[in-house]
Amino acid sequence: MKKLLIAMSILTFLFGCKKKPAPPEKPTNDAAAAEIETKKKAPFVWEGANIYFLLTDRFNNGNPENDVNFERTDSTAVLRGFMGGDIAGITQKIKDGYFTDLGINAIWFTPVIEQIHGATDEGTGNTYGYHGYWAKDWTTLDPNFGNKKDLGELVKLAHLKGIRVLLDVVLNHTGPVTDKDPVWPSEWVRTEPTCTFDTYENTTACTLVKNLPDVLTESDEPVELPDALLAKWKEEGRLSQELDELQLFFERTGYPRAPRFYIIKWLTDYIHEFGVDGFRVDTVKHVNENAWAELKKEADYAFGTWKKKHPDQVLDNNEFYMVGEVYNYGISGGRLFDFGDKKVDYFDHGFKSLINFELKNDAKNSYEKVFRKYNSLLHTKLKGKSVLNYLTSHDDGSPFDQERTKPYKSANVLLLTPGASQVYYGDETARPLIIEGTEGDATLRSFMNWKDLDTIPKIQKIHEHWQKLGQFRRDHPAVGAGKHKRLASKPYVFSRTYVDGEYKDKVVIGLDLPKGKKSLRVKGFFGNGTKLLDTYSNTEVVVKNGRVTLENDFEMALLELVE
């Protein structure tokens, strides 16, 4: 009997810490892979989304034949011209499974509408509208980025892979004036004064910077379409179509033909046509807040109409998503942004989420301090809403870890902090953020470092860490949208729990773990005898005496229930 008990104890130990068999190879057939990916049991929630943000022109060149248009051939300052990235390049990476392997479930790319044709020179050398924020015509795409067929293919393939698509939209300004791009009529835009940002009015009724005409979004006065735009449409053979569509829009809505309503119509057309899932809205605080509620109303109408027309392509019951860039908004402010003389609740004007400018500073604190703070605010002041966290971006000159010396810490903070996460292209490959010879934000916008990923083992190891963590986050809404609780301080172990109706998601995560043998406390969260999988090391364990034991050289554990 004693020998039998000893044998059983040995078997129990071996079963309690065994390597799970290697998963089968991924299907090579795109349709088969897509079918598997879209059958994930975990519901998608924007509050915990893992969003990948990229500059369309700087990510991947899928079609070299569209690299030069409108005679944009003048020399430019460093990293201030077009470099060839396009919609087709993004689609290729979706097809290759790049985003799926990274655990991404939404993609946001910079605007792809037609940009000004000329270049500006404000004393630092020529700059073209490679970044997409200098609109010339909201109704069509810039051929440097691709065409509407390309965009339709991207959205359709992304949806097949279970990935949502966010369009980056601009309502408050046109592109700069150049020798090829005349200023819009004075009934449409103001060209002065330049914003001083010290009051509400000096932030909304002004130009963001010199030579960036500001749309009169506060006006309800009807205006005629600019002659230059009408002439352009006529030359392109679509004048009557555009006019007919506008007539139908204004008849349906009853809005005055004021500047903002034209642009709202043009922006929501992309929802009607392609079924995009959301907008990332640029320069939110430079527009009277009522305009955003109007944009959301029309976006909801367009999204609902598209779903009715394409029932077989509907991913879920989520409403249209809007996340706003209110520059310098921080989560500590709760629902309010303070202009000094006025406070505005943008969450009450169409926004589900705002970009959070605070995490890059919070990241200097301990994990627990960050997680506890965000958990508290998201489940009290911001309950029902969310924030989009980031550590690096295209226009923040003071990112966390600009020298890319802490890529693992960056991944851990960004992907494990409660809220939605914004992975900026190259975060996962330590793409350099300091480029010699650049001026201003251009240094943050180099071309994606694919060659480094293909050839440098150190970069490949960093990338693998982002993949493991990203997939765990995507597969578990508890990570970003759930409630946080510390289970042990040394080694640091915490839990996340997400409940929505009958769906419940529970995970335990360990950080800064010792190498070799380690014991993680899960008492009070997972009961004795519970089978868990550490997805980081691909090891199955069983809870014993309120703990699980792992033996490996990893400093992280990502524990989920074994089905």
Image: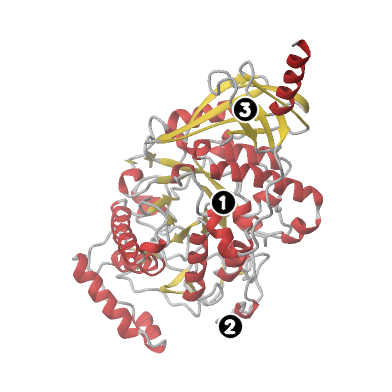
Residue located beneath label 2 in the image? 71
Residue at the image position 55 percent from the left and 30 percent from the top: 370
Question: Which residue bears the numbered disc 3?
Answer: 366
Give yes or no for contact between labels 1 and 2 (Cβ–Cβ under 8 Å): no
Residue type of the residue flagged with mark 2: Glu
The 10 Å Cα crowd at callout 2, few under 14, some 14 to 19, many 20 or more, is few
Q: Which mark is on residue 104?
A: 1
Task: Pick whichever of labels 2 and 3 is earlier in the sequence.
Answer: 2
Marks 1/3: CA–CA distance: 26 Å
Amino acid found under the numbered disc labelled 1: Ile
Quadrant where the C terminus sits is top right
Please state which of the two labelled residues, at mark 1 or mark 3, is closer to the viewer: 1
Residue 57 position within the rendered picture, expressed as x and y whole percent measured from the top left: 60, 67
Q: Earlier in the sequence, mark 1 or mark 2?
A: 2
Q: Amino acid at mark 3?
A: Ser
Q: Is residue 176 visible?
A: no
Res 45 label: none
How many angstroms separate mark 2 from mark 3 (CA)? 52 Å
